[in-house]
């Protein structure tokens, strides 16, 4: 079986009987060796001791007072975040359960790079065995912002960290922990170079054709289907559309903040102007294999998924919306 996304650290995790990811000491240690948590030469004794002891025992209890005693304010904040993240992973039986708890709760506040890393490694698990580079490249939208690239009349997506200039979006991976840089040129994923994805999957340097009617939207539909099936245990069929036509928008899920705003306006009967509609990149129709799982009001109606770009030409997908926004009855039972 071909491997991919090695930098997410999936090989450091265990799996339970249902194939869900279970946190290990090795996975936790990978966080503690990050540059942000490695004490500099002038770090206080409290910080140096905490770091050394957690590398030996990554599950060691850490009192609030111990973190508060760290002299450097930035270091204190970094330790507060990583220990809150560790607490979440240890509290839940699997990483999938931890992610669901995170997105369903308004009380857990973590920086986006922690959340994106959870998505990255869980999606790697959900796509285990997938040998279609187009589906894997489409799935990168789940955890890495994309930038629209001008190219003739095609809609191309490029990884923002690779093509976005001097201030890339931060990413949490083993490669970034090791200080790796991305200096490769960006190619467009095609049948001719698709096999190279396996060697460069952690470089994120392949642009992706997302033009309507091409393989791009269909590949994203498959990635979303597998994500929902793996995390929620719910079987769905997802079909890319080229237009909404006259369909009744009984239920919709915005896959990003921009698309959510568009859906809200359409729901309230507004007509979107051409400039706004130009930012709508993709539309999907979702149907449930088991209609009994769907809430009564829309049991016999499809749900629609919408993906858009923001005014800065960035696509920032929110995969949690696929887990929290579907019209599923008794959602807890699905997990």
Image (spheres, rainbow, N blue to C red):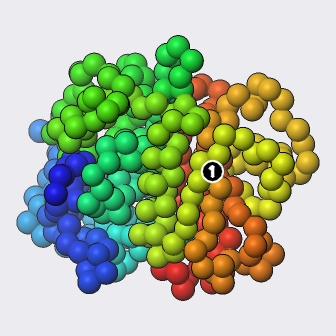
103 versus 259 height, above or below: below
| Quadrant housing residue 303 | bottom right
Element type at mark 1:
strand
Q: Which of 149 and 61 is in front in this view?
A: 149
- Rendered residue at 55%/31% (across/down): 211
| Quadrant housing residue 183 | top left
Residue 23 pos. (x, y %): 25, 71
Could you tell me how many numbered marks the image carries?
A: 1
Q: Can residue 267 be seen in this view?
A: yes
- Rendered residue at 32%/33% (across/down): 191
Taking the view exactly as shown, the residue that stands out farthest to the top is 152
- Rendered residue at 41%/69% (across/down): 230
- Rendered residue at 81%/75% (across/down): 297
30 versus 215 height, above or below: below
103 versus 309 height, above or below: below
Residue 170 pos. (x, y %): 37, 37
Q: Give the left or right position of residue 226, taking residue 291 as reference.
A: left
Q: Name the residue under label 1.
A: 284
Q: In which quarter of the image is the N terminus?
A: bottom left
Q: Give the left or right position of residue 153, taking residue 268 as reference.
A: left
């Amino acid at each position: 079986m071909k491997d991919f996304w090695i930098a997410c650290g999936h090989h450091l995790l265990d799996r339970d009987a249902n194939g869900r990811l279970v946190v290990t000491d090795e996975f936790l240690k990978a966080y503690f060796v990050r540059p942000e948590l490695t004490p500099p030469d002038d770090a206080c004794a409290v910080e140096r001791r905490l770091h050394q002891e957690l590398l030996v025992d990554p599950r060691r209890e850490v009192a609030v007072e111990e973190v508060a005693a760290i002299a450097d304010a930035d270091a204190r904040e970094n330790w507060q975040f990583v220990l809150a993240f560790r607490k979440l992973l240890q509290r839940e039986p699997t990483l999938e359960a931890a992610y669901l708890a995170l997105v369903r709760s308004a009380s857990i506040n973590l920086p986006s790079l922690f959340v994106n890393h959870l998505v990255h490694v869980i999606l790697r698990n959900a796509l285990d065995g997938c040998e279609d580079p187009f589906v894997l490249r489409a799935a990168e939208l789940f955890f890495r912002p994309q930038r629209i690239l001008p190219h003739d009349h095609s809609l191309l997506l490029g990884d923002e960290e690779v093509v976005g200039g001097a201030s890339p979006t931060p990413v949490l991976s083993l490669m970034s922990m090791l200080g790796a840089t991305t200096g490769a040129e960006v190619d467009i994923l095609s049948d001719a170079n698709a096999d190279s994805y396996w060697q460069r999957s952690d470089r994120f340097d392949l642009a992706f054709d997302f033009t309507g009617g091409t393989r791009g939207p269909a590949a994203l539909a498959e990635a979303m289907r597998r994500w929902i099936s793996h995390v929620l245990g719910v079987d769905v069929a997802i079909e890319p559309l080229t237009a909404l036509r006259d369909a009744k928008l009984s239920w919709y899920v915005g896959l990003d903040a921009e698309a959510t705003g568009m859906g809200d306006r359409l729901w309230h009967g507004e007509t979107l102007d051409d400039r706004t509609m130009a930012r709508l990149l993709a539309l999907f129709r979702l149907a449930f294999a088991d209609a009994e799982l769907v809430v009564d009001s829309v049991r016999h109606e499809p749900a629609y998924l919408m993906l858009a770009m923001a005014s800065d030409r960035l696509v920032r997908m929110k995969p949690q919306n696929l887990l929290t926004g579907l019209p599923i009855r008794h959602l807890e039972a699905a997990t």
